[in-house]
Amino acid sequence: MKNELKVLRASRQMTQQQLAQQVGVSRQTIHAMETGRYVPSTVLALKVAHVFGRGVDEVFFLEEGD
């Protein structure tokens, strides 16, 4: 699964730590999501999308073969 987290964070000048605090996870979890090593739960994906005022499918998307 790919995502636009890094781009969205940069557009708001938001750190990984700031996003982590807003959605209730560790900074390491945000880093793992950004690098594709962690696929978030539905609840976490919804929380992240809400922070950016986007739909989940605008933040996270499947790669071919997923």
Image: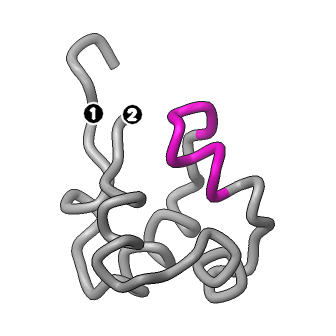
Q: Which mark is residue 46?
A: none
Q: Quadrant of residue 10?
A: bottom left
Range covered by the magenta-colored residues = 30-38
Query: Eyeballing the image, is 10 above or below 2?
Result: below
Query: Eyeballing the image, is 29 above or below 26?
Result: above
Residue at horizontal 74 percent and vertical 64 percent from the top: 27
Q: Kindly identify which residue carries mark 2.
A: 1
Q: Quadrant of residue 6?
A: bottom left
Q: Does the segment drawn in magenta span residue 66?
A: no
The one nearer the camera, 2 or 27, is 27
- Residue 13, percent from left and from top: 42, 83
Q: Element under label 2?
A: loop
Say which amino acid is labelled 2.
Answer: Met
Say which amino acid is labelled 1.
Answer: Leu
Residue at horizontal 41 percent and vertical 72 percent from the top: 9
- Residue 29, percent from left and from top: 71, 54
The one nearer the camera, 37 or 62, is 37
Q: Earlier in the sequence, mark 2 or mark 1?
A: 2
Q: Kindly identify which residue carries mark 1.
A: 62
Residue at horizontal 51 percent and vertical 59 percent from the top: 42
Asked if marks 2 and 1 touch (Cβ < 8 Å), the reply is yes
- Residue 66, percent from left and from top: 34, 19
Q: Quadrant of residue 1?
A: top left
Does 20 sit left or right of 60 as displayed? right
Does 11 sit left or right of 13 as displayed? left
Would you call the spot at circle 2 few (<14 residues within 10 Å), some (14-19), or many (20 or more)? some
The one nearer the camera, 13 or 56, is 13
Task: Check the image and tell me how it is coloured.
Answer: one colour
Q: Does the segment drawn in magenta span residue 36?
A: yes
